[in-house]
């Protein structure tokens, strides 16, 4: 059935394995799942392709990445999309390596391009749920020294 | 070596189109009847059944079969070739002698469930967390490949349009396709509305209803039957989850390299021996990237290659000569299987490749947990000399 609230991670995830990630989002922290043997980062909850699951742990990540590829959605495939199009949907390559799917917010969809520097912002989609979305890094905006 | 030991002894293709008004099960039955008649085999000789529709528990009573095994399998658009691989495996291990692989779908004759829980004439699917951000359907996932290809190689919307126009030209002279007698121009493509950038409407295939069935058996058994059989020269598979780990998943349409290597090694031929290609093509970019991956043109040159006319009937590799999924009909992986078989049986009509003896068939679909990590399956078919 259609959830009465905006879709959150509990509506689309197969189980609870990624809960530490979504729980950290409540505190505006972006985590990655990292292998303690080789240091390779993964997202979502994964099993290291070289070292298995024994040393996997959630760790703080930078929340930064670049747009690896993207599309701008113009067609409303579902009635619920009609007042949202056009919007940019991207695969972000996180600074630590893994891919993360997100929409790109805070800019005109036409500005989105491959290689664009982006960072996570945290969006409270309802009273209980915070999810990360990605937005362009505005270079020089904060550091003008 | 697989080469030459197994054959597709029968092909059944129902009417394919939009709003046919038949149910999925009835289309399965129709396709099976046609395949049995085409093979010239007694119904009772079918001792293996592989269902490839989205029906999880397939009731073979309606099909009138009494096989030694009956199961359904699903790997998206790779299922068609995979079902033939599984049929061969069953025969090789002594589980059956004659296997029917049957597909049908009736998406445009039934109300479909959308990812948001509503229903309508067009369905959507989605899986996993990208759904929260508005990722539904296959178009967006394929657009990710297209955008990377444009970024890396300068592929243009006009290149994508060349695929759409070429395949519509094929379909426009092939009765029974959605594009029959409806040719389009590149200007039509460029004027069609943007759906999921960079795909315009004419870069996307449409759902159609229809059924397809094939009868798989040993070459010896096939030669004894009255119908025309086609030899399975080689089969291979690869999975794009491999490229997820290396970060190449969006730069590679699928993991075609191992699939192609296995199939061509079994067949004992090179890509130069392929006379006609039937490539899985839900979106225009799929043809460009597969032509490159199979070695019909160098990496990055698929767009100019198609624009040059290389995939037309008088080109170096006639491709999707029945219009493909884009303009022919969408029977998932069975669109390509059907066209590969038709060409080698000499049933291509106005778009028959003269003297075609070897066909390349591909399929992709299923997933490794996230969209774009799809399975790929390759099949090389040949005329029995």
Image (spheres, rainbow, N blue to C red):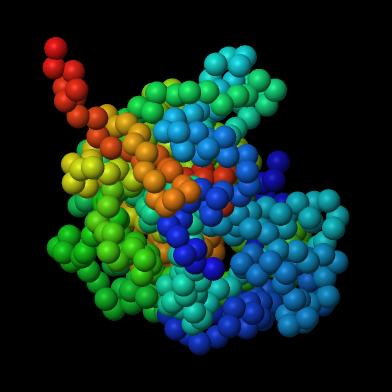
Q: Quadrant of residue B352?
A: bottom left
Q: Nearer the viewer, residue B316 or B247?
A: B247
* Residue under the point 42% across and 64% down: B325
Q: Quadrant of residue B219?
A: bottom right
Q: From this view, report whether residue A133 is shown above or below residue B226.
A: above
Image spot of residue B349 (x, y percent): 41, 73
Which residue in the rendered view is the most extreme toward the bottom? B21
* For residue B145, side relative to residue A84 (left or right): right
Which residue in the rendered view is the most extreme toward the front? A127
Residue B337 seen in render: yes
Residue B279 seen in render: no
Image spot of residue A94 (x, y percent): 40, 28
How many numbered tags mark residues here? 0
Q: From this view, report whether residue B195 is shown above or below residue B42.
A: above
Quadrant of the drawing holding the C terminus of chain B: bottom right
* Residue under the point 34% across and 63% down: A81
Q: From this view, report whether residue B2 is shown above or below residue B104.
A: above
* Residue under the point 33% across and 74% down: B179
* For residue B337, side relative to residue B56 (left or right): left
Image spot of residue A22 (x, y percent): 51, 39
Quadrant of the drawing holding the N terminus of chain B: top right
Which residue in the rendered view is the most extreme toward the top? A145
Q: Nearer the viewer, residue A91 or B235?
A: A91
Image spot of residue B317 (x, y percent): 37, 51
* Residue under the point 63% across and 47% down: A15
Q: Quadrant of residue B46?
A: bottom right
């Amino acid at each position: 059935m259609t959830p009465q609230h905006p879709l959150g991670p509990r509506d689309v995830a197969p189980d609870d394995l990624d809960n530490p990630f979504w729980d950290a989002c409540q505190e505006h922290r972006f985590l990655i799942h990292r292998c303690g043997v080789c240091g390779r980062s993964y997202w979502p909850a994964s099993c290291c392709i070289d070292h298995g699951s024994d040393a996997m742990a959630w760790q703080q990540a930078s929340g930064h990445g670049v747009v690896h590829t993207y599309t701008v959605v113009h067609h409303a495939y579902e009635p619920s999309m009609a007042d949202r199009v056009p919007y940019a949907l991207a695969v972000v390559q996180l600074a630590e390596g893994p891919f993360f799917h997100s929409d790109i917010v805070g800019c005109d969809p036409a500005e989105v391009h491959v290689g664009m520097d982006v960072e996570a912002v945290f969006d409270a989609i309802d009273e209980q749920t915070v999810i990360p979305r990605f937005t362009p890094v505005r270079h020089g905006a904060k550091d003008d020294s | 070596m697989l080469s030459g030991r197994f054959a597709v002894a029968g092909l059944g293709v129902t009417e394919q189109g939009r709003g046919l008004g038949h149910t999925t099960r009835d289309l399965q039955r129709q396709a099976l009847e046609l395949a049995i008649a085409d093979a010239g085999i007694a119904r009772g000789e079918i001792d293996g059944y592989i269902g490839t529709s989205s029906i999880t528990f397939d009731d073979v009573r309606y099909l009138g079969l009494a096989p030694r095994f009956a199961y359904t399998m699903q790997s998206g658009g790779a299922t068609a070739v995979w079902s033939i691989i599984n049929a061969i495996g069953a025969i090789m291990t002594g589980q059956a002698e004659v296997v029917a692989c049957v597909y049908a779908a009736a998406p445009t004759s039934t109300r479909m469930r959308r990812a948001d829980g509503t229903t309508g004439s067009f369905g959507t699917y989605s899986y996993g967390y990208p759904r929260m951000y508005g990722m539904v359907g296959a178009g967006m996932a394929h657009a990710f490949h297209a955008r990377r290809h444009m970024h890396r190689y300068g592929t243009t919307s006009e290149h994508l349009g060349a695929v759409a126009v070429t395949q519509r030209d094929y379909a426009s002279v092939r009765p029974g396709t959605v594009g029959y007698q409806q040719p389009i121009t590149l200007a039509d493509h460029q004027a069609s509305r943007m759906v999921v950038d960079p795909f315009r409407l004419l870069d996307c295939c449409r759902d159609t209803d229809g059924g397809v069935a094939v009868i798989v058996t040993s070459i010896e058994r096939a030669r004894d039957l009255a119908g025309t059989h086609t030899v399975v020269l080689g089969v291979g598979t690869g999975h794009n989850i491999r490229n997820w780990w290396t970060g190449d998943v969006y730069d590679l349409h699928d993991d075609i390299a191992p699939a192609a290597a296995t199939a061509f090694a079994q067949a004992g031929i090179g890509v130069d021996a392929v006379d006609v290609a039937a490539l899985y093509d839900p979106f225009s970019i799929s043809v460009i990237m597969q032509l490159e991956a199979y070695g019909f043109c160098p990496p990055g040159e698929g767009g100019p290659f198609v624009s040059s006319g290389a995939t037309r009937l008088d080109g170096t590799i006639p491709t999707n000569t029945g219009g493909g999924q884009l303009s022919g009909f969408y029977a998932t992986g069975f669109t390509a299987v059907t066209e590969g078989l038709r060409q080698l049986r000499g049933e291509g009509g106005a778009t028959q490749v003269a003297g075609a003896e070897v066909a390349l068939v591909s399929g992709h679909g299923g997933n490794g947990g996230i969209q774009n990590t799809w399975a790929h399956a390759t099949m090389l078919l040949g005329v029995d000399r």
